[in-house]
Image (cartoon, rainbow, N blue to C red):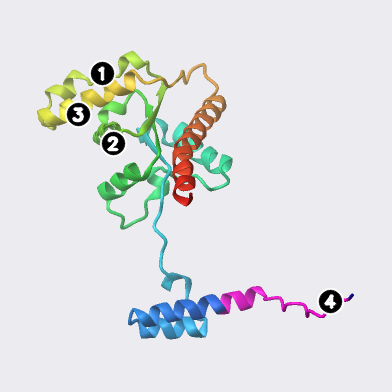
């Protein structure tokens, strides 16, 4: 027997956009923003007027710019984006901050959000106040740390005496930096010699290690979500 049911009408993408605009207009009206509500209702809200979604970072790349920004740091940033098809966001200072961003606040937020931190140690790493403070914050936040020893041995991760003796840092800061370097020194990482090593191989190996650690951090969250639904 033939069915007497009529086929359901198909909504176009323009219909969906119109419905979304009306819903958003209602929400804006409820918050008292009459002008923006009217614009949504007419479907004429410019991109810059739409609420900006906050950036979320999965990876923080700690590095000495003068040594590695245009080599391993940037290549790793690009490789992670490619491997994840844009789903994994990495914090790399010159890629993640815009003019007008507050430097310390942006860095602190990137460290707070990240699941995995990559510390690229190089010859001039210890000259950077930012490098040392970032590393200390990463270790104190108990983030998963993947060290890359770029032209430097793990045994060389010792705060130089001139830094210890300088008047730039307080005794408490020197202690923070020393403990952070000690933690990194005894963490399994990747060692690379710029004179003989294959940079492409280093970047690929590092990116795969980061992706594996991210997947491991996601598993407990997924289990918790499943349990919460039971």
Q: Earlier in the sequence, mark 1 or mark 3?
A: 1
Specify the segment rendered in magenta: 2-18
Q: Which mark is residue 158?
A: 1
- CA–CA distance between discs 1 and 3? 12 Å
User: Could you tell me if the residues under marks 1 and 2 are in contact, i.e. CB atoms within 8 Å?
Assistant: no
User: Could you tell me if the residues under marks 1 and 4 are in contact, i.e. CB atoms within 8 Å?
Assistant: no
Instruction: Name the residue tied to disc 3.
Output: 176
Dot 4: element: loop
Rate crowding at label 2 as few (under 14), some (14 to 19) or many (20 or more) other CA atoms within 10 Å. few
Q: Residue at x 78, y 80 (%)?
A: 6
Q: Residue at x 51, y 35 (%)?
A: 211
Q: Is residue 135 above or below residue 107?
A: above
Q: Earlier in the sequence, mark 2 or mark 4?
A: 4
Q: Which mark is residue 141?
A: 2
Q: Earlier in the sequence, mark 1 or mark 4?
A: 4
Instruction: Name the residue tied to disc 4.
Output: 3
Work out which residue is located at the far top of the displayed protein and give it: 155
Image quadrant assignment for residue 14: bottom right
- CA–CA distance between discs 2 and 3? 12 Å
């Amino acid at each position: 027997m033939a069915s007497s049911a009529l086929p359901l009408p198909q909504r176009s993408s323009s219909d969906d956009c119109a419905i979304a605009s009306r819903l958003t207009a209602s929400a804006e009206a409820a918050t008292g923003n009459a002008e923006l509500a009217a614009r949504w209702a007419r479907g004429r809200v410019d991109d810059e007027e739409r609420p900006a979604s906050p950036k979320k970072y999965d990876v923080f790349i700690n590095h000495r710019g003068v040594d590695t920004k245009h080599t391993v740091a940037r290549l790793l940033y690009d490789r992670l984006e490619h491997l994840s098809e844009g789903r994994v966001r990495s914090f790399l200072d010159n890629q993640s901050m815009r003019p007008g961003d507050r430097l310390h606040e942006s860095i602190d937020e990137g460290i707070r959000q990240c699941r995995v931190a990559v510390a690229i140690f190089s010859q001039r790493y210890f000259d950077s106040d930012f490098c040392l403070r970032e590393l200390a914050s990463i270790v104190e936040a108990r983030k998963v740390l993947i060290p890359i020893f770029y032209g430097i041995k793990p045994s060389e991760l010792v705060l130089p005496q001139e830094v210890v003796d300088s008047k730039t840092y307080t005794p408490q800061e020197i202690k923070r930096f020393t403990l952070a370097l000690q933690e990194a020194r005894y963490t399994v990482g990747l060692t690379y010699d710029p004179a003989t090593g294959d940079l492409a191989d280093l970047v690929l190996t590092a990116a795969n290690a980061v992706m594996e650690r991210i997947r491991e951090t996601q598993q407990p969250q997924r289990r918790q979500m499943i349990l919460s639904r039971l």
